[in-house]
Amino acid sequence: MSLIYCQFFKDILKTAAKENHIVDLLFGKVGTFGSQGLGLFLNSMAIWILVGKEEIKTLWRNLLTFLLMCDSGFIVADFIIACYYELGLAFLIWVLPGMFTIKEIFYLCNILITIALSYERYQILSKK
């Protein structure tokens, strides 16, 4: 009998989750905002590193910088949406429809730039 399918194990997990709200807090709000903050910080550092070096300007580098900026925009839009739903900030209701639209636009840009990056790398490798 597997540990995952054991009803006793499931009951222990449910009881622990009910009694310990720290687990819910860590994997809920803190986990959401922490991962978004970390992602935004790392994207900002990568943009700063890529833009700061002036000796080589390539298409791949420009595409990667734009991808990181689109990803940062996606994270900011998702952060605003999460502030409304997770923290209950009612004044964000007015910008929420726009944030959903902006989030999806940044998501589409991420997909298209990823395809452009892979095509550009393919072109470089096929020439050699």
Image: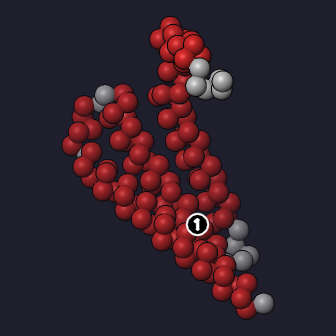
Q: Locate the N terminus and report the quarter of the image it occupies.
A: top right
Which residue is farthest top?
A: 19
Does residue 59 appear in the picture of this structure? Answer: no
The answer to which of 15 and 128 lies nearer the viewer is 15
Where residue 63 sits: x, y (%)? 57, 72
124 w.r.t. 6: above or below: below
The answer to which of 56 and 16 lies nearer the viewer is 16
99 w.r.t. 1: above or below: below
Does residue 16 appear in the picture of this structure? Answer: yes
User: In the picture, residue 38 is in which quadrant?
Assistant: top right
Where residue 122 sits: x, y (%)? 66, 82
Q: With 28 as the anchor, is 8 left or right in this view?
A: right
Q: Locate the C terminus and report the quarter of the image it occupies.
A: bottom right
Where residue 69 sits: x, y (%)? 51, 60
Name the residue at 54% across, 65% down: 67
Name the residue at 50% across, 21% down: 25
Judging from the image, what secondary structure is the residue with disc 1 in?
helix
Which residue is farthest left?
A: 94
Name the residue at 59% across, 53% down: 43
Determine which residue is flagged by label 1. Answer: 65
User: In the picture, residue 8 is in which quadrant?
Assistant: top right
What colouring style does the render use? secondary structure
| Amino acid, disc 1 | Thr
Which residue is farthest front?
A: 1
Where residue 26 sits: x, y (%)? 54, 24
Q: With 46 as the anchor, is 7 left or right in this view?
A: left
Q: With 54 as the anchor, is 29 left or right in this view?
A: left
The answer to which of 88 and 112 lies nearer the viewer is 112
